[in-house]
Image: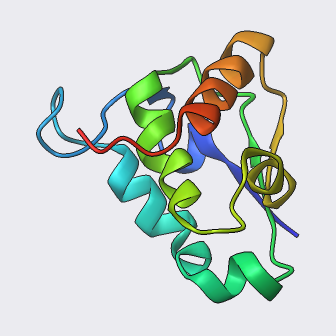
Amino acid sequence: MQVIDIGNDFYHRLANRDETQGDGFNNAVMFREKYLKEFDNEEEWQNGNKSIKFDFVNVTKIGPSFANEAFAYFTKYKNATPANILKKFIFTNISNVKLLIISKELESGYNPK
């Protein structure tokens, strides 16, 4: 299973939804396209067995808009329930607060802008 040290490989502050928010860099759309592209199809959520592990040891912040665009985006697929998303996207070394932000966004569903 692929393990991504987000803070070192991407950025330590996960706050921008897209290029129009904040400084526009290191945003959730870029993150999703870099790491989660292979999950962006109905077939993977119905029959796929891929998973990816994200290490949050070097992440200082995650904002709700980032979590929504990067992770809750996949709730648009029929079988991409919050529980199934958390089986495919495994988070390690993550604080309870950061995990709560992600979980709340998954429960709310994808809300673009």
For residue 78, above or below residue 89: below
Q: Position of residue 86 (x, y in %)?
A: 80, 48
Q: Position of residue 102 (x, y in %)?
A: 63, 30
Within the image, what quadrant is residue 105 found in?
top right
Identify which residue, 39 or 52, lies in the foreground: 39
User: Seen in the image, is 110 located left or right of residue 92?
Assistant: left
| Residue at the extreme top of the image, as rendered | 97
User: Seen in the image, is 98 located left or right of residue 95?
Assistant: left
Quarter of the image that includes the C terminus = top left
User: Seen in the image, is 48 located left or right of residue 111?
Assistant: right
Q: Position of residue 79 (x, y in %)?
A: 72, 67
Labels in figure, total: 0
Specify the color scheme. rainbow
| Residue at the extreme left of the image, as rendered | 20
Q: Position of residue 29 (x, y in %)?
A: 34, 54
Identify which residue, 6 or 47, lies in the foreground: 47
Quarter of the image that includes the N terminus = bottom right
| Residue at the extreme front of the image, as rendered | 78
Within the image, what quadrant is residue 77 found in?
bottom right
Within the image, what quadrant is residue 48 found in?
bottom right
Q: Residue at x 70, y 18 (%)?
A: 100
For residue 35, above or below residue 105: below
For residue 59, above or below residue 30: above
